[in-house]
Amino acid sequence: MKLTEYERGLLSGAQGKAKQTAMEIVCRMGELYGAAELLEISRAHLDGCSYTAVWDGGLEFMELLASQGGRVAVPTSLNIASCDGFCGKDFGNPEDFTEKCRRMEAACYQMGCIPSWTCASYQCCNIPAFGECVAFAESNVVNFCNSVFGARTERTGDLVDICCALTGRVPAMGLYLKENRYGTKLYDVRGLTSKRLEDTSGFAALGYLIGATAGNLVPVVDGFGRRITQEELKALSAASAASGPVGLFHVVGTTPEAPDLRTATGGREVKETVTVTDALLEETFRGLSEGGGTAEDVPVDLVVLGCPHLSFGEFCRAMDLLGERRVSGGLRAWFQTSDAVYRLLSRIGMVKKAERAGIKIMRDSCIMNQPMDMWGFRNVVVNSGKMAHYAPGNLNANVYFRDMRTCVETMAAGRLVDQR
């Protein structure tokens, strides 16, 4: 690869051992992908900061870089931690596990990272501009960054992410290059009339369908008669990045690289077209539920909202739906969000209201990244396409995918209240 004088200095150790190690890895990755040069980045977001994403080997690597004097070269936010740093014991985390999470936090802080600890960094702390070159990890963050902001990142791998942050460089490859960003597979939604799309769960189902069928093509969604909201895009982004390798999608008339279909595709013919019908969307929606049973015979153990982390608006909407009711005594209800959003909610009394209702709030973490064996969950209700994809294996439980209203009604009733 062609390197600048500054980059050659990083590689030779002029900026210290940690940056030299990081640069060696960045350059090796560039060589593997055939990159001609490196690109300068302006910010980063780490997924390798979560202990359960990288385990002991990754923890040792992060601590090594920190001990070698490593400091990030650009503002760098952190994805979720593997335990709630404020009330981890309430969620049953073992002490030795919690201690390793604390060590990971310490290494990240020593290297100058921002203590954001959220899988929705685009909601509060790390928002790139259109065309900005960044190094983001975590599938939904990558997808949202590329698609909704029109910034440029590849799916930066765990531990490679900290190397990019330390050096301020990424290989010129993949979605960093304009020619790879044009839409190549069309999803025609003009015929959709489903009421599923009145809730973000419908967009999660659409995203799941796209991710499962797009393969390595760049999806373009065309035919909505309105602009899609940020929270609808969030649901679509997270689900499409969970069910497949989607790192960029376009929604014609909404996302910045798709003011019209011709711009989204670069004026080229798409390689494939899928006509999304109400029946296909409904089939996908229903397919996101694991396990059988009806509303009358499913004893729900847990309702969990916030994957990705709940926004301020999503949290308030759930509480509005609950009203003055409480969570049923035989059921657990967990809301997941960042500490930044939590503190905003605290200022308007929403945290106290949720706690009085029997809701536990998990800050800066997610049950998908924690040891959940001790709880023995059997039936879990979620409104997240991403969680519906991962939770059956991670929790060893039946997972029921529903809209937010059904999730809240289930919390109050203590059993699955189906409103389909």
Image (cartoon, rainbow, N blue to C red):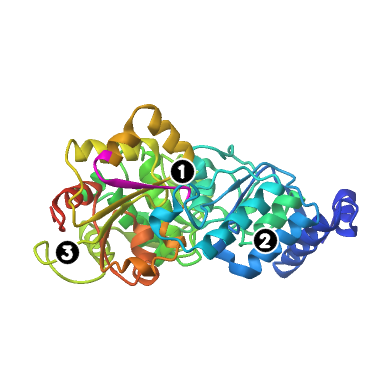
Tag shown at residue 299: 3
Relative to 259, is 146 above or below? below
Q: Amino acid at mark 3?
A: Pro
- Specify whether residue 152 is painted magenta: no
Nearer to me, 342 or 269: 342
What residue would you read off at disc 1?
338
Nearer to me, 239 or 371: 371
Relative image position of residue 261 (x, y in whole percent): 44, 46
What residue would you read off at disc 2?
160
How far separated are the C-alphas under marks 1 and 3? Answer: 29 Å
Specify whether residue 163 is in view: yes
Comes first in the chain, label 2 or label 1: 2
Relative image position of residue 87 (x, y in whole percent): 44, 49
Residue drawn at point x = 60 percent, y = 59 percent: 48
Residue drawn at point x = 24 percent, y = 51 percent: 403
What is the magenta range? 356-364
Q: Secondary structure at mark 1?
A: loop
